[in-house]
Amino acid sequence: MNICMMSLTMQNSTPQEIVDIAVQCGMKSIDWITAHKSDPAWLGKISRDAGLEVAAFTPLDNAYINGENNWKDEFKYSLDAAVAMGAPVMMVPPFPLKKHPEMSEGRKYWTDFYAWATPLAKKANVILTCESTGYSTSPITTADENLEVIRNVPDLRITFDNGNIETAEDAKEAYGKLKDYVVRFHLKDWKIADQEFPGSDKKRNGKYFAMCAIGEGSVDLRGLWDLVTPEQKQFTVNLETWKPDGDPFSLEEYRVICDRVRNW
């Protein structure tokens, strides 16, 4: 497995500390989730200086996610950041929107957004991707919802997030439908139960989910990974993992998780 550091899981660390952690965990690349209030070109430089590729850039909390009036300018700024850091892929997650609370309305908003944004990314030689999001009101979670968007935006690609898909349907079945459009992976594990338990919240499928270390939850991650095509097994994989209380793991704990899945 080509494990990639996901900078969001180490959000309380400095960018240089995040790079050092990636190296110490034996990773080959890094996915910058936000620019950590830093110069994007510098983020790319410190990554490459450490022998890490920049796998992707995921901007968060921007105007186009919130549906604000200046969203087009904000997206262009984020795209410029992706280019500056040398990210071949940029992912914009389709979060629920206050302005479009109905899932179908939200899906239309995001379809229109991706239809506008994907050609700009393509012109900049950046692959734009979406992912399934895992909130109870997420407009794009299931495989069919993803396919509805892609039918309207054929150049859009998918960062396959198994954990978010699991909040609505079986991720293994979803992968079979979406694999032709997948360019990267996010892997996460959950503890899942029919009844509420401490730290859990209710998801779209009516079950209760809580974060946990990868390999210690209820999700059949190994079963999913066994279905992944040999070519796609070489794609970068973010281990999106936190403790049940939402805190990140220590370096040593993170290294154990990486070693657990490295040779799948």
Image (tube, rainbow, N blue to C red):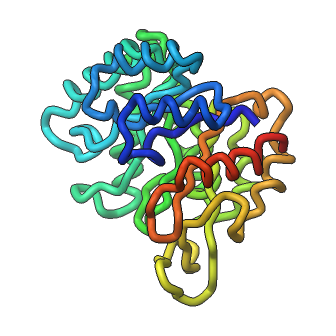
Q: Is residue 77 left or right of residue 152?
A: left
Q: Quadrant of residue 188?
A: bottom right
Q: Is residue 40 above or below residue 137?
A: above
Which image quadrant: the N terminus? top right
Give how far across and how far down residue 131 sits, in percent. Answer: 52, 44
Q: Is residue 92 left or right of residue 50?
A: left
Q: Is residue 136 above or below residue 81?
A: below
Q: Is residue 93 left or right of residue 28?
A: left
Q: Between 158 and 78, which is closer to the camera in this rendering?
A: 78
Q: Quadrant of residue 99?
A: bottom left
> Which residue is drawn at the image coordinates 40% and 14% (left, top)?
83
Give how far across and how far down residue 213 sits, in percent. Answer: 62, 61
> Which residue is drawn at the image coordinates 83% and 56% (left, top)?
223
Q: In this orientation, does residue 239 appear?
A: yes
Q: In this orientation, does residue 143 appear?
A: no
> Which residue is drawn at the image coordinates 47% and 77% (left, top)?
201
Q: Is residue 124 above or below residue 59?
A: above
Q: Between 63 and 256, which is closer to the camera in this rendering?
A: 256
